[in-house]
Image (spheres, helix red, strand yellow):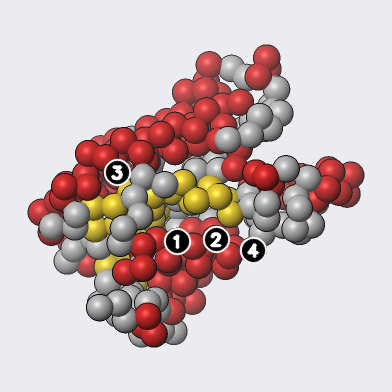
Amino acid sequence: MMDYRNMFDFTGKKILVTGGTGTLGSEFASAFASCGADVVISGRDRKKADEVLKKCRIYGGKFDFVSCDLSDIRSVREMVARARDILGRIGVLCSHAGYSIRRPALECTEDDWDSLISIDLKAPFFVACEAAKIMKEQNGGRIINTASVSSARGHRNLSIYASAKGGISQMTKVMANEWAPYGITVNAVAPGYVPSDQTADLIGDGSKRDELLSKIPMGRFGKPEEIASTVLFLASPGASYITGQTIYIEGGRMID
């Protein structure tokens, strides 16, 4: 029987958040920590990681940071293994690391393509595979990837980023299909525009900001906690029969 009152009680749950030092990744980590989980975050910036861990530790669980170079698959494998060693198991993977290149397609270089696809698509693929090997041994787990509203819209100047995020959505479906027999669900969240370092150049520009807001039926940008709450739901018992889905969190942008 479902315990609705304690749906978001993650006491004792073991969570790995990649990209855990960014705006959304740090919010995911803090959200899980506030619900009782033990959390390992990965990234490259130790100073930012310490700030995130300080916020998490007020909740009294186990929290740690593992450095990782996502362009190096050996580093990716070592990061997941280290997270498992720290936590004892990995119950939930929030795969969030990535970045964007905002440039017309005709101006993009081969290096642009290779570097972004490596971080935004190749690395999440191998992070998920390494976590799934552990979850298979544990007879289950949750994997939550990060796609984007750009994966389903033809946003100008985001051709490589949209390609990578479209790949994440399709990868999520295939992994969900393959790993369901092992008790592993695989879903993705696809945020719309949320104020962050990655969107500062758009949201901080008055004319661009107004143009973006005019295309969002709810008339505002998203908040990090609105994305995090969806991640928590996908990791909760309430989402136990949901897999292979990409959940768009974008204020109605997709219905316009």
Neighbour class for label 4 at 10 Å: few (<14), some, many (≥20)? some
Cβ atoms under marks 3 and 4 closer than 8 Å: no
The image quarter containing residue 63 is: bottom left
Cβ atoms under marks 1 and 4 closer than 8 Å: no
In this view, the mark in front (1 or 3):
3
Q: CA distance from mark 1 to mark 4?
A: 13 Å
Q: Which residue is mark 1?
A: 231
Q: Position of residue 34 (x, y in %)?
A: 43, 79
Cβ atoms under marks 4 and 2 closer than 8 Å: yes
In this view, the mark in front (3 or 4):
3
Cβ atoms under marks 2 and 1 closer than 8 Å: yes
For the N terminus, the quadrant is: bottom left
Residue 187 visible in the displayed image: yes
Residue lying furthest right in this view?
207
Q: Which residue is mark 4?
A: 223
Label of residue 176 in the image? 3
Label of residue 194 in the image? none
Residue 203 visible in the displayed image: no
Q: Position of residue 8 (x, y in %)?
A: 39, 76
Instruction: Name the N-terminal-most of marks 1 and 3.
Output: 3
For the C terminus, the quadrant is: top right
Secondary structure under the numbered disc 1 in the rendered image: helix
Residue occupying image coordinates x 58% and y 54%: 249
Residue occupying image coordinates x 25% and y 62%: 91
Q: Which residue is mark 2?
A: 227
Instruction: Name the N-terminal-most of marks 3 and 2.
Output: 3
In this view, the mark in front (3 or 2):
3
Q: Position of residue 50 (x, y in %)?
A: 45, 68
Front-most of residues 62 and 246: 246
Vertical relation: 14 (above or below) 246: below
Residue occupying image coordinates x 61% and y 26%: 159
